[in-house]
Image: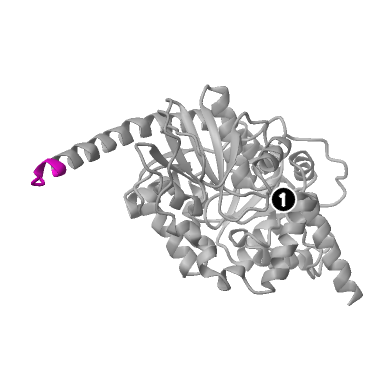
Amino acid sequence: MVGMIGLRVRQVWALAKRHGILGAISMVKRRLQHGPGSSKSRNVFQHYDFVRVDKVELAAEPAREGTLLWFIPDFNIGSGGHQTIFRTIMRLERMGWESSIVIVGPAHHANAESARHDICEHFFPLKAKVYMGVEGLPNCEFAIATGWQTAYPVRAITGNVKKLYFVQDFEPNFYPVGTESMLAENTYRFGFFGITAGGWLAKKLKEEYGMRTHPIGFGVDHDCYRLRPRRDDSVKRVFFYARPPTPRRAFEFGLLVLEAVSRRLPNTQFILAGWDVSDYLIPFPHLAAGVVSPEELADVFSQCDAALIMSLTNLSLMPLELMASGCAVVSNRGECVEWLLNDEIAALTDPTLEALTDALCHLLQDDEARRAQCQRAQAFAAQQHWEASADAFVQGLLTARIALASTNDAEVSSGESASAAVPV
């Protein structure tokens, strides 16, 4: 009992560090109110209220060209998807585009000011104003959905706003077949113009859902992720991106792989980062680093020889960051990975316990092969820049401006014709 109380205290303290005292209290209160079961099972209509929104009205003043209204779910510090969104907003601001951010759905931030503080403090110093909920929003040229839940309020916006969808993952696969997977998949049929993270998603959404799409690439923050001095060469180290609440990162399967490696090469050290996993039973020596800052993470990368990164719904940003830091990457095969990675720069294998274990052990035992892969990977990562990604995003906006303007004109013409045909 004492151990369980200590665990709960550590969990609440971790929440307070990530979300602040008020945010932690709010989350604990919701947990106590709803009990151990999912809150959505107790109040279905409240949980899925965003699906039933039938009208979102923006301010009446005319929209200015170059204005963007980003609809996002609330965020945790360290969220990779939000980091990409906020980084894109920052670079677009530098290029003269004006953004506002709308947080929709369940929120742990107490208000817009708190959310904006966390964005500027823990992500990037944005000029963008932040709104909570869909009331009192400014007009804009483009409304941009991000996570699938945000596509529903964007669909409900009235007027001639151009509706975009920034798709970073194939989100139906975040869930078992059921309500969430179906609702997520339906958003690809809303008629939005899609700007996608990589060519695999662009191709998939176009071919399977008829979306008009424009892909952008990934970049690397080269000021942060770079080769740093190795402090101890006497042991081999493996990094694992450990995020239990993110099923697409296959945390449990990754542990099985690491345990198999530890049995074959018992002197190997393991470093796990991405989430607090201190309450998991992990039967091999390891350092559970938890959620760390990008600078701390970059240093960890440079102290490791190899890394296991699982990407099941689209490629993670982490392989490029590891490559830039001089760490060899092991990952699963699949179209969602191989749109960017290949066998020259990463050890790609079938996603089986045996194949991934073999790949890691090979790199740990064959220094020459590992160094050669790292050199090729570093050269590749050096060519990936967020400036190019932002330029591609702007090109997507310009393409969407033309495509959606012609669509809106056609709809207006069609509506006028239909009205004229109705007898008075």
> Residue at position x 84%, y 67% from top?
7
Q: Quadrant of the C terminus?
A: top left
Residue 19 in magenta stretch: no
Indicate the secondary structure of the residue bearing disc 1: strand
Residue 419 in magenta stretch: yes
Residue 113 position (above or below residue 181): above
- The one of 90 and 223 positioned closer to us in this rendering: 90
What's the image's color scheme? one colour
The range drawn in magenta is 418-424
Look at mark 1 in the image and give the residue it sits on.
306
Q: Position of residue 382 (x, y in %)?
A: 62, 31
- The one of 92 and 109 positioned closer to us in this rendering: 109
Q: Quadrant of residue 361?
A: bottom right
Q: Is residue 237 visible?
A: no
Q: Quadrant of residue 117?
A: top right
Q: Position of residue 132 (x, y in %)?
A: 59, 45
